[in-house]
Image (spheres, rainbow, N blue to C red):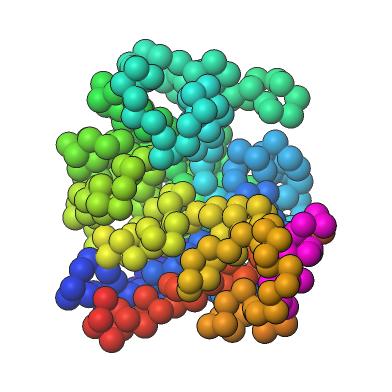
Amino acid sequence: MISFKLLKKSKKSLARLGLLKTPHGIVQTPAFVAVATQGVVKTLTSEEIPQTKTQLAICNTFHLHLKPGEKIIKAIGGLHKFSKLPFPLMTDSGGFQVFSLGFGRDLGIGKIGSNDSRREVKAGHQPKEVKIAKTGVWFKSPIEGKRIFLGPKESIAIQEKLGADIILAFDECPPPNASYRYNKLSLEKTHAWAKLSLSAAKRHPATRNKQALYGIVQGGKFKDLRIASARFIGALPFDGYAIGGEFGSDLKSMSKMLKWVNAELPENKPRHLLGIGHLKDIPEIVKAGVDTFDCIVPTHYARHGTGFTTKGKIDVNKTKYLKDRRPLDNNCNCYVCKNYTRAYLSHLVRAKEITGLKLLTFHNLYFFNSMVDGIRAAIKKGEF
């Protein structure tokens, strides 16, 4: 089972230092969480990931259920033995796929998407390929096309077999352009599913003692719904809390919305923010009282040829970098910056060599984690 110890609270913000202890290691918080959707951080080996300062990764329940299947992973000893990932792991519940394979795909939007009232998702609307019911969700498999049902009991059963240190309650992640009424009805389902997720997890005490279960707060952009959800989920006996859904289209809105939620959640339990973590977001996320947060940005941008530096983003696809003998970032101590030039990285990416994407991924993760290292140090000194 995990435990969370609050070490220090900032006097300048809601930022906090903590230690998250799990069966597979200790995480110093606040911490950036790498995305390992299918049990791998794309392009990196499991041995390389810790060298990027990564302390924790999140895997995708829905996709691992599709392939190779939780039974295969359990038979090999669970995600840690299957993947050889040598640090704590989380699994999501599949709730995000309710959005991404549903309204997200239908409308071509992400979590931070259009709020165009002409495309507003209203109460009673259903996605084309996903059927959201009272008891759970019917999906169409993107692999075979067959129908798959996922509800609280099914999600927890899959996650227990996968064996991550932290698992999440099943929820619905509404689209950012959903109406107030849609969000209210969605929240009623998410709250009912939270209680069913807890009940399902309690049926297997041996597993329950090894895995922590987080409840998920939803409510969209609506203050009363966010606060109501935080109070409801915060009152249930979860081991920690995840915050899902949309958080506005700018930093000010995000910070305000996170503060609504964190003002209501129990102080002595960890808080995880789902799917948000651009560089500009990170200081505000931490100042709003979040302990861990995951985001695809460092790995996604790397696979498109972009490296993050203290001077801004660098797109090594550009020809001007073919003659640049400097490292990506003179201030970075990662393996890539110590050994390779922008010229070589540019060559690899332009030549479509996989190694170029690997090196950029390594650097980007190291860069993001180093930034959070600095924030933890600043909180400790009372400067953040």
Task: Write the start and end of the magenta stretch as one range.
Answer: 340-352
- 46 relative position to 121: left or right: right
* Residue 102 visible in image: no
Residue in the picture at 52% in, 46% down: 92
- 258 relative position to 56: left or right: left
| Location of residue 97 by image quarter | top right
Which quadrant is home to the C terminus?
bottom left
Q: Nearer the viewer, residue 13 or 157?
A: 13
Q: Nearer the viewer, residue 102 or 265?
A: 102
In the rendered image, the residue lying farthest to the top is 124
Residue in the picture at 53% in, 71% down: 309
Q: Nearer the viewer, residue 1 or 101?
A: 101
Question: Is residue 341 part of the magenta span, yes or no?
Answer: yes
Residue in the picture at 64% in, 22% down: 140
- 192 relative position to 67: left or right: left
Q: Is residue 384 above or below residue 257?
A: below
- 370 relative position to 139: left or right: left
**Horizontal and vertical percent for residue 57?**
56, 60
**Horizontal and vertical percent for residue 159?**
58, 46
